């Protein structure tokens, strides 16, 4: 059934002649009287069968112009309804994005929380700016993801000089000199934490994680129910979000694939809402991007290429790190790769099911594998700070689990092609727990975690499945 993409419903009999007679629409008695009576089962069956008799199904080439196709078909008769639909897996993955992505309201709410927090912080740091980064803005965020915020302190010493010079300012603002940026970050986050804890009733469950490599303040904004992470001096991560956002836009297949892999990993207990020795969503995203760079031809360019296309105004160096990428995405040539999402999904699992993680590391800046530079089980090089390994936290057990589950997923997709009437079909198959799902229970926090809520996705895919089976018109 894969590949049927277009359905036309004419009002006349299905025929190959050019004349299709339009039947006058006769309203049922209940509708004419303004009452709303449900059809009986027998009526529904009869109507559906008649509808099917008057329908034709056309398989179109991938890049067909829908408007032109309709015009050409209309030369042969009236078209009462038409529906375009994609091959099943592709449709499922796109459906997944529609179902899980952040809505317009979600995004607005996230910026609003930043603005509220900024209002609070300006009491102690008048020119501070707070903005979201991470999955809230990189186009890979799903409903309920955490809100990563970046508190931009600017350069405190410069700030001090500037405010001294500006004598017209009504408030003279000074801060103490800090020994180094890390101490400044820790101190400011600690003070902001106290502010939230003691002053604002909207923020609760405040946790200061100040000794981490990247000090962070964790809290919940209760009115919006958002879990928030506030960092400072983290401008490179903001550039990373811009880069991921660019990749999400350069090819329409990137987002569905990343969402599917993140969803699969969550359902298989590979990822968790707490940090630990397991792979993170960010690492998974980089794995998907790297795989898409390896396809032939590649689906997305490398970061080096995005840098080559950059204009002078795009030039950005932060803490001696070159974070330049092109901002005008229309300069990027679309990929010639025509693989379907289903192929790419399968390709991802094949690729990582046999990737030599012991010897090679992954770098999306160059789009090439390279020799390992550290001794952790998995190495994904941070594309901007190349001395950092994004997946340093992943232990051997978790890596093996990821590889094994990738191999299983690849086998399942392979089998799916061979079975004609498989009830647990498509992405649904991948969301079921694998036999090794409990393997990570000994890795700490995972054991005290509730099982992931795959039910929501299960319901979604059951409904997609029944739509295909019982009511193709609804698609
Ligand atoms: N980041 C980074 N290096 C890391 C971890 C994170 O540069 N080792 C940056 C990335 O830009 C990432 C952001 O910090 O997008 C936020 O990290 P995190 O919340 O872990 O990932 P998200 O992409 O926001 O994914 P999630 O939906 O799981 O929160
Ligand atoms: Mg996040």
Image (spheres, rainbow, N blue to C red):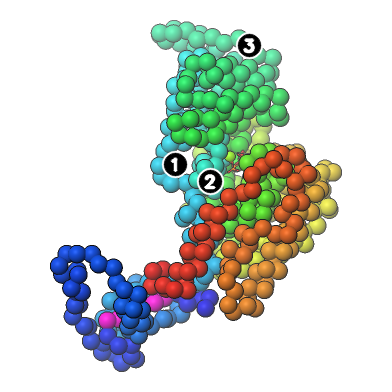
Quadrant of the rendered image holding ligand 1: top right
Q: Residue at x 15, y 70 (%)?
A: 32
The residue that label 2 is drawn on is 141
Q: Are marks 2 and 3 in contact (CB under 8 Å)?
A: no
- Seen in the picture, residue 278 relative to 25 is either above or below; the reply is above
State whether the magenta stretch is mostly helix, strand or loop: strand
State the extent of the magenta-drawn residues as a range.
Answer: 6-11
- Seen from this angle, which residue lies furthest bottom? 17
Distance from disc 2 to disc 1, alpha carbons, whole Å, reads 10 Å
Query: Would you say the residues marked 2 and 1 are in contact, meaning their CB atoms lie under 8 Å apart?
Result: yes
Separation (CA) of disc 2 from disc 3:
38 Å
Crowding at dot 1, Cα within 10 Å, few <14 / some 14-19 / many 20+, comes out as some
In this picture, is 94 found above or below 156?
A: below
First reached walking from the N terminus: tag 2 or tag 1:
1
Relative to residue 22, is residue 269 depicted above or below?
above
User: Seen in the image, is 462 located left or right of residue 15?
Assistant: right
**86 or 334: which is nearer to us?**
86
Cβ of mark 2 under 8 Å from ligand 1: the answer is yes
In front: mark 2 or mark 3? 2
Q: Secondary structure at mark 2?
A: loop
Give the spatial CA distance, label 1 vs label 3: 38 Å
- Tag on residue 106? 1
Q: Helix, strand or loop at disc 3?
A: loop
Q: Earlier in the sequence, mark 2 or mark 3?
A: 2
Where is residue 144? Give x, y as percent. 52, 42
Label 3 sits on residue: 177
């Amino acid at each position: 059934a894969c590949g049927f993409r277009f359905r036309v419903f004419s009002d006349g009999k299905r025929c190959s002649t050019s004349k299709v007679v339009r039947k006058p629409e006769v309203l049922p008695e209940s509708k004419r009287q303004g009452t709303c009576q449900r059809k009986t089962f027998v009526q529904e069956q009869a109507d559906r069968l008649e509808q099917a008799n008057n329908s034709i199904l056309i398989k179109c080439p991938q890049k067909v112009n829908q408007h032109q196709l309709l015009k050409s078909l209309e030369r042969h008769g009236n078209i009462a309804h038409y529906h375009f639909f994609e091959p099943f897996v592709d449709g499922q993955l796109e459906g997944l994005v529609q179902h899980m992505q952040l809505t317009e309201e979600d995004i607005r709410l996230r910026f609003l929380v930043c603005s509220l927090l900024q209002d609070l912080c300006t009491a102690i740091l008048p020119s501070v700016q707070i903005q979201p980064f991470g999955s809230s803005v990189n186009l890979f965020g799903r409903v309920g993801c955490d809100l990563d915020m970046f508190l931009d302190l600017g350069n405190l010493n410069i700030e001090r000089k500037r405010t001294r010079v500006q004598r017209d300012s009504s408030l003279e603002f000074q801060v103490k000199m800090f020994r180094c940026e890390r101490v400044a970050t820790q101190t400011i986050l600690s003070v902001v934490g106290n502010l939230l804890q003691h002053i604002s009733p909207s923020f609760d469950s405040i946790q200061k994680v100040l000794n981490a490599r990247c000090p962070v303040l964790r809290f919940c904004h209760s009115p919006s129910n958002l879990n928030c992470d506030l960092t400072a001096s983290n401008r490179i991560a903001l550039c990373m979000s811009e880069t991921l956002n660019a990749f999400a836009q350069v090819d329409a297949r990137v987002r569905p694939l990343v969402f599917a892999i993140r969803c699969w990993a969550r359902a298989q207990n590979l990822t968790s809402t707490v940090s630990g020795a397991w792979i993170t969503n960010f690492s998974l995203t980089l794995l998907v991007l790297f795989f898409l760079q390896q396809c032939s031809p590649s689906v997305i360019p490398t970061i080096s290429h995005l840098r080559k296309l950059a204009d002078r105004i795009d030039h950005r160096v932060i803490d001696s790190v070159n974070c330049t990428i092109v901002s005008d995405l229309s300069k990027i040539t679309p990929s010639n790769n025509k693989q379907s999402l289903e192929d790419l999904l399968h390709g991802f699992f094949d690729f990582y099911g046999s990737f030599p993680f012991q010897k090679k590391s992954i770098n999306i800046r160059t789009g090439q594998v390279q020799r390992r530079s550290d001794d952790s089980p998995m190495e994904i090089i941070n594309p901007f700070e190349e001395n950092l390994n994004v997946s340093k936290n992943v232990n051997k057990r978790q890596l093996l689990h990821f590889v094994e589950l990738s191999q299983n997923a690849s086998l399942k997709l392979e089998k799916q092609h061979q079975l004609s009437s498989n009830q647990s079909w498509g992405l649904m198959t991948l969301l079921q727990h694998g036999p090794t799902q409990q393997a990570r229970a000994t890795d700490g926090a995972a054991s005290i975690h509730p099982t992931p809520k795959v039910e929501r996705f299960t319901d979604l895919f059951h409904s997609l499945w029944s739509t295909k089976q019982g009511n193709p018109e609804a698609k």
